[in-house]
Amino acid sequence: MANHKSAEKRIRQTAKRRLHNRYYAKTTRNAMRALRNTTDKAAAEAMLPKVSSMLDKLAKTNIIHPNKAANLKSGLAVHINKMQ
């Protein structure tokens, strides 16, 4: 366990941040899953800007790497373009 007040505070801050990051990462993954499971191309195109924005925010706050966000956005765009 922590021996200093600053270490105890750091533990509290880390736990709080971890919950915050997990919430937004999971919400984004669920949005991506919903977009991929959509069969209607118009609905998927409407969802893409929202999901892209979520990924950009995760990358900006270092929850995910910027290149990973770019790869995921690219994959979603390819998925939508292949739809009938």
Image: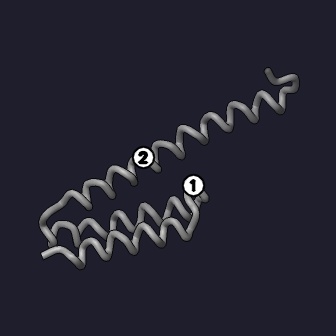
The residue located at (33%, 65%) in the rendering is: 50
Horizontal side of 68 relative to 80 (left or right) equals right
What residue would you read off at disc 2? 26
Question: Residue 40 in the image: x percent, y percent?
Answer: 12, 66
Q: Nearer the viewer, residue 1 or 8?
A: 1
Q: Nearer the viewer, residue 20 or 78?
A: 78
Identify the amino acid type marked 1: Ile
Q: Quadrant of residue 62?
A: bottom right
Q: Quadrant of residue 78?
A: bottom left
Mark 2 crowd level (few <14, some 14–19, many ≥20, 10 Å Cα): few
Secondary element at image label 2: helix
Q: Quadrant of residue 55?
A: bottom left
Question: Residue 61 in the image: x percent, y percent?
Answer: 59, 59
Q: Nearer the viewer, residue 12 or 38?
A: 38
Horizontal side of 55 relative to 42 (left or right) equals right
**In the depicted structure, whether residue 30 falls above or below residue 39:** above
Secondary element at image label 1: loop
Badges 2 and 1: C-beta atoms under 8 Å apart? no
Question: Residue 34 in the image: x percent, y percent?
Answer: 25, 55
Name the residue at the bottom extreme.
81
- CA separation, marks 2 and 1? 11 Å
**In the depicted structure, whether residue 76 falls above or below residue 64:** below
Identify the amino acid type marked 2: Lys
Question: Residue 10 in the image: x percent, y percent?
Answer: 75, 35
Mark 2 and mark 1 lie on one chain; the one further toward the N terminus is 2
Q: In which quadrant will I find the C terminus?
A: bottom left
